[in-house]
Amino acid sequence: MTHPVQPDLLHTVLQLLTTDASSSLAEGFRLLLNEAMARERSAVLQAQPYERCEGRLGSANGFKPRFLNTRVGPVELRIPQVRDGVSFYPSALEKRRPQRAGSHARHDRTDRREIASRKAAPQG
């Protein structure tokens, strides 16, 4: 159950990486990460896209867009989705966690205390 090799993808990424623009680097990163996530989903489902077999654990359910901020700029990813009771999230990414109410206020208080302590420090 190996994922089919896509020589066009590798060729495209290599062409992008040999250019000097940072947007080309971001595009190459996007292509590679999207392919890696699709392969990981196939491994979890134990079947390739559109493959029908007895060992298949669930079904692919499209993709969800997500932006990832990187040093070379924002990269738009396609997060593979699954259904039929299979739990999957790409290991290359962290799940977004909902912020608790008041978490910003706690950080604001800490920042204010640090600023106040710097102001109170004697000037030498």
Image (tube, rainbow, N blue to C red):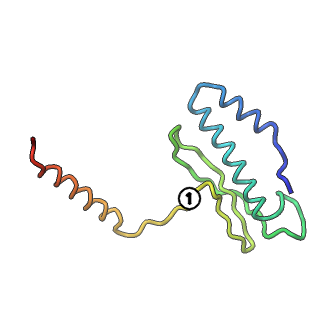
Q: Nearer the viewer, residue 123 or 88?
A: 123
Picture coordinates of residue 117, whole percent (x, y): 17, 54
Residue picked out by circle 1? 94
Picture coordinates of residue 49, whole percent (x, y): 82, 57
Q: Amino acid at mark 1?
A: Glu
Q: In the picture provided, is 32 more to the left or to the right than 96? A: right
Quarter of the view holding residue 59: bottom right
Picture coordinates of residue 4, whole percent (x, y): 85, 48
Identify the residue at horizontal 63%, vertical 49% (top origin): 77
Q: Residue furthest front?
A: 124
Identify the residue at horizontal 78%, vertical 65% (top origin): 45
Quarter of the view holding residue 58: bottom right
Quarter of the view holding residue 114: bottom left
Residue 108 vs 32, above or below: the answer is below
Identify the residue at horizontal 52%, vertical 61% (top origin): 96
What crowding class fits label 1: few (fewer than 14 Cα within 10 Å), some (14-19), or many (20 or more)?
few
Q: Residue furthest bottom?
A: 85
Identify the residue at horizontal 71%, vertical 29% (top origin): 15
Q: In the picture provided, is 24 more to the left or to the right than 46? A: left
Q: In the picture provided, is 63 more to the left or to the right than 104? A: right
Element type at marker 1?
loop
Marks counted in the figure total: 1
- Quadrant containing the C terminus in the rendered view: top left
Q: In the picture provided, is 80 more to the left or to the right than 74? A: right
Picture coordinates of residue 94, whole percent (x, y): 56, 58
Residue 74 vs 55, above or below: the answer is above
- Quadrant containing the N terminus in the rendered view: bottom right
